Image: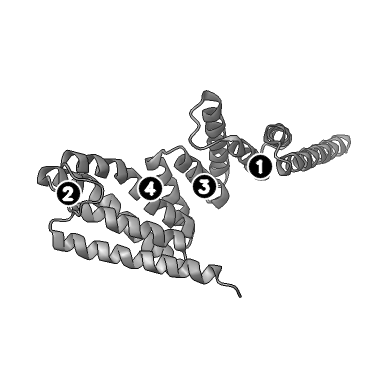
Amino acid sequence: MVRTALLLLFVTASAFAQKAELDAGLAAFQQGRYADAAQHFQRASQADPRSVTGRLYLGAAYGAQFIPGLDTPENQRFGAAAIEIFSRVVAMEPNNEQAIGSIASLYYNQKRWDDALEWNRKLLDIDPDTKTAWLSIGVISFTHFLPAQREARLQSKMRPDDPGPIRDVTVRQALKIKYMPMLDEGITALKRALEIDPEYDDAMSYMNLLLRYRADLLDTPAEYLTQTQLADEWVRKSLALKQKKSAPR
């Protein structure tokens, strides 16, 4: 009986300590004191190592300190720490959408495109209607292809505003083999995002870009023109939607 009472007392004290640290961490987080918040969430996780909530908050606190595009050792440590914490959550709960989505976002912001694609696909395996994951796949396809497309135009002695396709057939075919499957996946992903939300203007914008840049890999000027005309249509749809949203009600 004494042991049972002591165990209950310990469990109660641990739960109380965890709640106090979570509350303090949330207050610090809301005030933008992310380093302080991380310390509180770390202690909350230590008070109950089985707690998913504490780890999610801890990962968020590290992630909030990561600045996309800043290439410093400290910043990279914040990103790596956040991914590690969220990965522990996934190990505990393999279908935790918040953790999986956070990892996908962190990899995206680190420009680790292959990892970002992998984790967005994992998120879609759990919830196929996550429109932001479909958008991310489309954006990654475009972003990954853009430097190669620009370099190919330079090699073909083409200006940015010259109509396509890329003139150098050898260069164009090499790019097609390497990038066309990824670009096709990106377009399919954006179509799915727009099925989920027909007024998803970000998806419309990237549909325009993907169609327009992908057209450089096609075989004839006629095919290029057809695809750029489709891209123009998405520009018109996006502009019309933005005007609709900004119109006074």
Q: Which residue is mark 3?
A: 100
Q: Amino acid at mark 4?
A: Ile
Q: Earlier in the sequence, mark 4 or mark 1?
A: 1
Residue at image coords 51%, 26%: 72
**Residue 234: image x %, image y %?**
36, 65
Corner quadrant of residue 219: bottom left
From mark 4 to mark 2, how far is it between C-alphas? 22 Å
Furthest-left residue in this view: 169
Helix, strand or loop at mark 1: helix
Q: Judge left or right: residue 175 versus residue 45.
A: left
Q: Nearer the viewer, residue 237 or 38?
A: 237
Q: Is residue 199 visible?
A: no
**Residue at image mark 4:** 140
Distance from disc 4 to disc 1, alpha carbons, whole Å, reads 27 Å
Amino acid beneath label 2: Ile
The kind of residue on which mark 3 rests is Ile
Give the residue number, with chain letter if any, for mark 1.
57
Name the residue: 51% across, 72% down: 244
Q: Which residue is mark 2?
A: 166
Categorize mark 2 by other alpha carbons within 10 Å: few (<14), some (14-19), many (20+): many
| Point 46% across, 37% down: residue | 110
Q: Considering the numbered disc 2 on the image, is that residue within a helix, a strand or a loop? A: loop
Disc on the earlier residue, 4 or 2 = 4
Secondary structure beneath disc 3?
A: helix
Of 9 and 132, nearer the camera is: 132
Query: Which label sits in the foreground, 2 or 3?
Result: 2
Distance in Å between CA atoms under marks 2 and 1: 49 Å
